[in-house]
Image (cartoon, grey):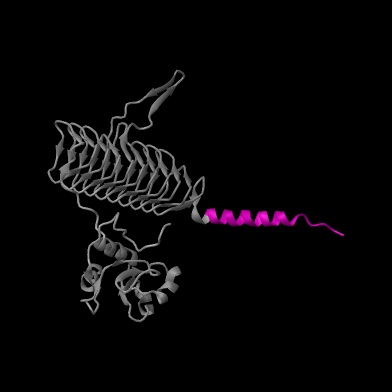
């Protein structure tokens, strides 16, 4: 039987604290009284107790606020006067960001334990910083560089010449080749970075593979989800900009360039040589054809099929993708036609 519990099962997460209200308020950039109060953890509104910090970010759950027994709640200033008696309002403009900061205070990411596991293989010519952690069964090939404070998880393969910057977290069973990584990058289990792109010449005789001679460049602070695949470039580099977040099961083709702070969500696919501007959001299961230019700040809806360039700021849905306004107009029109058809033809007397 599974028993409901507060976040942070001690079998899986390392907890710090208790922390004072003064420290939590300072982290959020707010001013409160009773700074000497101590809090031991975090929890949702419905399960939080007097020693917990909770949060409200979605007004759909505002009804839970009146009933919570949390000691303090991170919320928008619009809701600050709705906290129950005995609960302290921690009012911030971006409650979810505040919640992320406080959660990380109580449950920080594990620090690497500088060491090379006895079962790991570090080939001659590889350079591993003394402050790095190399996990069981990992292979660090000749010429690879692992920066200070980085951790390489169990059964990872870091190929020849690969550079992993400082304070990176490479989780279990990741394969990286032909790649240069910046600092503070997280790659989740099973990701494949730098394999051959899907490139070949077609003739009557069949398919002739085209050598893939580029690299993968990943900028500072990027995150790559579990089982994502990023092909190296053919004659150019595949570039993942700083702060880009790529979800699980995403495919990035060769020569793709993704601008800073873009988000690519689960099962999306980006075909080769497509250029994506900064701040773009590509929703789940979307597909982008090759050699496109996607402008800054574009929003691409779930399961969209993008087959042409998109100007900066565009919002598109559907397959083939078209503007959100046109898409919803078509949906309404089709619904009206369907309803009209069910009524049947009119008959005279």
User: At 38% from the left edge and 31% from the top edge, which residue is drawn?
Assistant: 198
**Which residue is at the far front?**
1
Q: Is residue 160 above or below residue 78?
A: above
In the picture, the quarter occupied by the N terminus is bottom left
Q: Position of residue 267 (x, y in %)?
A: 42, 45
Find out whether residue 104 is within the magenta segment. no
Q: Would you say 144 lies left or right of 264 here?
A: left
Find out whether residue 341 is within the magenta segment. yes
**Which residue is at the far right?**
349
**Which residue is at the far left?**
130
Q: Would you say 145 lies left or right of 336 here?
A: left
Nearer to us in this view, 172 or 342: 172
Task: Confirm whether residue 92 shows in the render.
Answer: no
In the picture, the quarter occupied by the C terminus is bottom right
Q: Position of residue 14 (x, y in %)?
A: 25, 57
In which quadrant of the rendered view does residue 103 lie? bottom left
In which quadrant of the rendered view does residue 97 lie? bottom left
User: At 16% from the left edge and 34% from the top edge, which residue is drawn?
Assistant: 126
Q: Is residue 91 above or below residue 334?
A: below
Q: Position of residue 253 (x, y in %)?
A: 37, 37
**Which residue is at the far bottom?**
85
Nearer to us in this view, 344 or 2: 2
User: At 41% from the left edge and 67% from the top edge, which residue is drawn?
Assistant: 58
Q: Position of residue 5 (x, y in %)?
A: 37, 62
Nearer to us in this view, 203 or 228: 228
User: At 40% from the left edge and 74% from the top edge, which residue is drawn?
Assistant: 65
Q: Is residue 210 above or below residue 107?
A: above
Q: Main secondary structure of the magenta part?
A: helix
In which quadrant of the rendered view does residue 174 lie? top left
Query: In the rendered structure, which segment of residues is drawn in magenta?
Result: 326-349
Q: Is residue 288 above or below residue 3?
A: above
Task: Confirm whether residue 334 shows in the render.
Answer: yes
């Amino acid at each position: 039987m599974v028993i409901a519990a507060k976040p942070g099962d001690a079998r899986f997460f390392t907890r710090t604290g208790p922390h004072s209200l003064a420290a939590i308020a300072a982290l959020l950039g707010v001013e409160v009284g009773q700074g000497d109060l101590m809090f031991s953890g975090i929890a949702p509104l419905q399960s939080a107790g007097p020693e917990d910090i909770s949060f409200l970010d979605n007004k759909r759950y505002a009804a839970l606020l009146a009933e919570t027994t949390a000691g303090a709640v991170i919320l928008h200033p619009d809701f600050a006067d709705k906290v129950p008696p005995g609960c302290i309002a921690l009012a911030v403009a971006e409650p979810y960001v505040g919640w992320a900061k406080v959660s990380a205070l109580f449950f920080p990411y594990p620090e690497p334990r500088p060491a090379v596991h006895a079962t790991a293989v570090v080939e001659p010519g590889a350079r591993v910083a003394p402050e790095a952690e190399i996990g069981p069964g990992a292979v660090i090939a000749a010429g690879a560089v692992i920066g200070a404070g980085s951790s390489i998880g169990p059964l990872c393969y870091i190929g020849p010449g690969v550079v992993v910057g400082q304070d990176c977290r490479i989780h279990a069973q990741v394969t990286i080749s032909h790649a240069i990584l910046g600092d503070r990058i997280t790659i989740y289990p099973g990701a494949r970075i730098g394999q051959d792109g899907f490139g070949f010449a077609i003739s009557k005789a069949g398919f002739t593979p085209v050598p893939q001679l580029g690299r993968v460049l990943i900028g500072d602070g990027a995150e790559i989800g579990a089982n994502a695949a990023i092909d190296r470039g053919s004659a150019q580099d595949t570039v993942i900009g700083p702060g880009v977040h790529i979800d699980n099961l995403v495919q990035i083709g060769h020569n793709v360039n993704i601008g800073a702070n873009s988000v690519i969500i689960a099962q999306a696919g980006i075909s080769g040589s497509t250029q994506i501007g900064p701040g773009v959001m590509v929703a789940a299961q979307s597909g982008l054809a090759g050699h496109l230019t996607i402008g800054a700040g574009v929003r691409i809806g779930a399961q969209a099929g993008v087959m042409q360039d998109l100007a900066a700021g565009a919002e598109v849905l559907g397959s083939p993708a078209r503007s959100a306004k046109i898409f919803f107009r078509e949906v309404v029109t089709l619904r009206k036609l369907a309803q009209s058809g069910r009524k049947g033809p009119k008959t005279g007397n």
